[in-house]
Image (cartoon, rainbow, N blue to C red):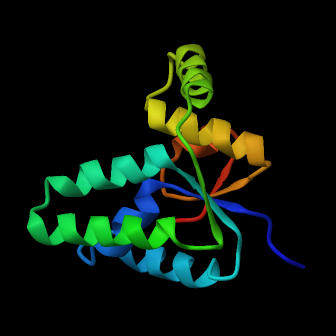
Amino acid sequence: MMRMSVFVDSAQYIAFLNDADDLHEAAEEAAQLLADVPLVTTEAILVEVLNFLSRRGPYYRRLAVALVDTLRSEPTLHIEPQTTKLLDEGIDLYRRREDKSYSVTDCISMVTCRRHGIKEVATADHNFEQEGFTILLT
């Protein structure tokens, strides 16, 4: 039986690139397990990865750009475009969860997961569990 699509969060990409990251080994294992699985992410996640790694110096900036270039040409990865409608839906969830620490990028990701019927997320971010998703990096 083929696994349903999995959403890939910035935590997966960042940990995969950074071998000093506490989640690096888990991210490598997840990448192997998900090699033949349809994946989904968002343009907002790609921006988040680029922004996070921009503070780590030229080496990580180059890695981040190379990763994004590779992901954008990966046929098994759907990158959900950032649209005004998606942003509005993300902001609406953000507004309704004022008791949570969700970022607007988290909310956009959660909305995208629901749109695609996704239940599993390649992340260690427990915010996704609070919304009923299964996280894969533990």
- Number of callouts in the render? 0
Q: Is residue 34 above or below residue 88?
A: below
Residue at point 65%, 36% (across, down): 111
Percent position (x, y) of residue 67? 37, 70
| Camera-side residue of 64 and 117 | 64
Percent position (x, y) of residue 8? 55, 59
Side (left or right) of 37 relative to 98: right
Question: Looking at the rendering, in which quadrant would you find the N terminus?
Answer: bottom right
Residue at point 13%, 60% (across, down): 56
Query: Which residue occupies the extreme right position in the image?
Result: 1
Residue 23 visible in the picture: no
Side (left or right) of 72 relative to 59: right
Side (left or right) of 114 relative to 58: right
Q: Is residue 54 above or below residue 13?
A: above
Q: Is residue 109 above or below residue 107?
A: below
Query: Which residue occupies the extreme front position in the image?
Result: 73
Percent position (x, y) of residue 63? 26, 72
Residue 101 falls in image quadrant: top left
Residue 74 falls in image quadrant: bottom right
Percent position (x, y) of residue 79? 58, 55
Residue at point 57%, 27% (across, down): 90
| Camera-side residue of 16 and 85 | 85
Residue at point 80%, 65% (across, down): 4
| Camera-side residue of 4 and 132 | 4
Side (left or right) of 32 relative to 38: left
Residue 117 visible in the picture: yes
